[in-house]
Amino acid sequence: MDQESGNFQSISECITAISAAKRIVITAHPKPDGDALGSSLALKYALEKVGKQAVATGLEPVPNRYQSFVKSGDIISVDEALAIEADLIIALDAGSIERIPKELSELKGRVKLLNIDHHISNVGFGDINLLDTGSCSTGEIVYQLLMAGGYAIDQDIATLLWIAIVTDTGRFAYSNTTPQAMHTAAELLKYGVNTEDVDRKIYRQLSKAELAIRKIAIQNLEFRHEEKIAFVTLTTADFDAAGCTVSDTEDIIEIPRCVEGVDVAVLFYEDKGNLGRINISMRSNGDCDLAELCASLGGGGHAKAAGCRVKGSMSDAQEIALQAVTARLR
């Protein structure tokens, strides 16, 4: 981490706040990916080791690929989390306060809020903000925090942090794979991470439902702007037909992204829990700044991977988003 960025001071402030707290609620963004889930549970386990009452919430539904890494009772409901009357809330991998459960965000001002994240679009919504856009993942920041605070790491914690790093770097293939990321990964291997088991369960093991939704995604593949934009549309009817949920969409964006000649890939999908809003995920193969683009639509993320939600119909969302992408590619 860059000392000039103030992150070393923020780590110290985080450690002080955690040390003073007895009851801690850990949360992250909805539809958790490997980074949100891995960093949250790794921090929970580490804090429990030093006698803290630490609970994780807002992390459901857990995508099928990660379920074997989650123990019974690891994740509780928001109501159960509120019942412990926390004296500290830690938000991980959430670009804005709107990305954590509303019931927790409403406690700001009464309960201290730590905001730990690596998204460039993060506005610094916490009482303490540990932000490092140079880190490959929030899991990498959590590792730095655990090391600085002298917290013990075991195989379970290391495996969860490995999941956070390996998924956010695309198995160490994305442009955010830095020397620091590789060094952190190497350190985690010392704790006995079974990398083959992680890779098989996350990337080489699909349920029939997951295969079915991918088949539908390929059938729904469309192109715009001289085929430099590829996009996939998934409706609630598509999820019902496949027998899966939106939690199984994490890698579907790679279907349009992998097409030769595509600069920007977009996934549009409906969520039964948020009808009237269309979820949009974007990935860039070129220089199009998707963080800026999605921020203009009320979302955020990274330059090459970002997302947002747009109110209205699917056709409305497609028109708004595809026009915005086309304008930037021009």
Image (cartoon, rainbow, N blue to C red):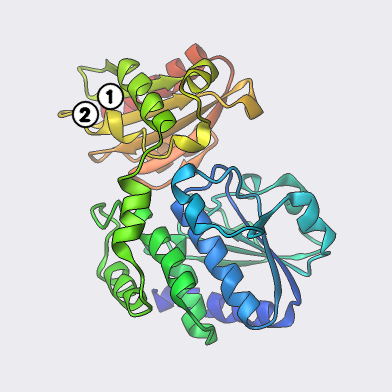
**Mark 2 surroundings: few (<14), some (14-19) or many (≥20) residues within 10 A:** many
Residue at horizontal 63 percent and vertical 58 percent from the top: 72
Residue at horizontal 39 percent and vertical 74 percent from the top: 2
Residue 113's place in the image compared with 8, above or below, is above
Q: What's the amino acid at mark 2?
A: Val
Q: Position of residue 215 (x, y in %)?
A: 33, 22
The quadrant the N terminus occupies is: bottom left
Q: Position of residue 255 (x, y in %)?
A: 29, 30
Q: Is residue 314 left or right of residue 258?
A: right
Q: Position of residue 257 (x, y in %)?
A: 27, 33
Question: How many tags in the picture?
Answer: 2
Residue 274 in view in this figure: yes
**Secondary structure at numbered mark 2:** loop
* Of the image marks 2 and 1, the number of the one nearer the N terminus: 1
Residue 116's place in the image compared with 100, above or below, is below
Residue at horizontal 27 percent and vertical 60 percent from the top: 177
**Secondary structure at numbered mark 1:** strand
Residue that label 1 marks: 229
Q: Which mark is residue 63?
A: none
The quadrant the C terminus occupies is: top left
Q: Is residue 82 left or right of residue 316?
A: right
The Cα atoms of the two marked residues, 2 and 1, are separated by 6 Å
Q: Position of residue 157 (x, y in %)?
A: 48, 71
Q: What's the amino acid at mark 1?
A: Ile
Q: Which mark is residue 262?
A: 2
Q: Nearer the viewer, residue 196 or 58?
A: 196
